[in-house]
Image (cartoon, rainbow, N blue to C red):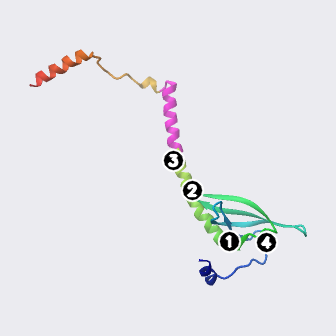
Amino acid sequence: TKTLIQSSANVIKITELVVGNTIKVVKTDYNNNPELYYGVVTDLINTGEKSYVQLSIYKRAYNRIESESVLYNGEKNIDIFPATPGEVREFLSEAAVAMRKSFEDKERELVEEQRKVEAVEAFVSGEKAKELTTTSFTELTQEEFSQLKQGETDASN
């Protein structure tokens, strides 16, 4: 795969970073799998001897966006690539739609759970219990039931 990618894609080297630049960052997860983040350069710090770049980066994770602010020192090699503001906007827009749907689903679930809680609380507080009645019933001994059953059987024959 590496050979195929290298023969197909141009090498991209960022030559200048400015606060507000939109970027893509490739980080590896705990299983060493690459993950793509989109982000923005939020700060550049240079003491003359030490340098740092601060990034706000975003990654889609299921129906939500994970975001983090990271500070890299100039000694660390990071896989950072240019991205257009349109790419970042599209990424965040698609994620926002998924997040909105997830939020609305959870909101419906919450409304249903609230209804259940209110029903139980109404019963416990006695408000609903005032409307309740005991079911009508007849209590028979087993012998009485057997005699009644025998009488029904005889009557049907």
Could you tell me residue 49's position as x and y percent?
90, 69
Relative to 103, say whether 136 is above or below: above
Which residues are drawn in magenta?
Answer: 110-127
Relative to 97, say whether 22 is above or below: below
The three-letter code of the residue at mark 2 reads Arg
**Residue at 11%, 25% in the rendered image:** 156
Could you tell me residue 139's position as x and y percent?
29, 17
- Label 2, residues with CA under 10 Å away: few <14, some 14-19, many ≥20: some
- Whether pointer 3 and pointer 4 mark residues with C-beta atoms closer than 8 Å, the reply is no
Quarter of image, res 30 = bottom right
Q: Tell me if residue 52 is in the magenta stretch.
A: no
**Residue at 23%, 15% in the rendered image:** 143
- Please report whichever mark, 2 or 3, sits nearer to the chain's N-terminal start: 2
In 3D space, how far apart are the residues under numbered discs 4 and 2 (Cα atoms)?
32 Å
Which residue corresponds to mark 4?
18
- Please report whichever mark, 4 or 1, sits nearer to the chain's N-terminal start: 4
How many numbered marks are there? 4
- Select label 4 or label 2 by which is in front: 4
Which residue corresponds to mark 2?
100
Could you tell me residue 72's position as x and y percent?
78, 64
- Please report whichever mark, 2 or 1, sits nearer to the chain's N-terminal start: 1
Local secondary structure at mark 1? helix
Which residue corresponds to mark 3?
108
Which residue corresponds to mark 1?
85
The foreground one among 31 and 49 is 31
In 3D space, how far apart are the residues under numbered discs 4 and 1 (Cα atoms)?
14 Å
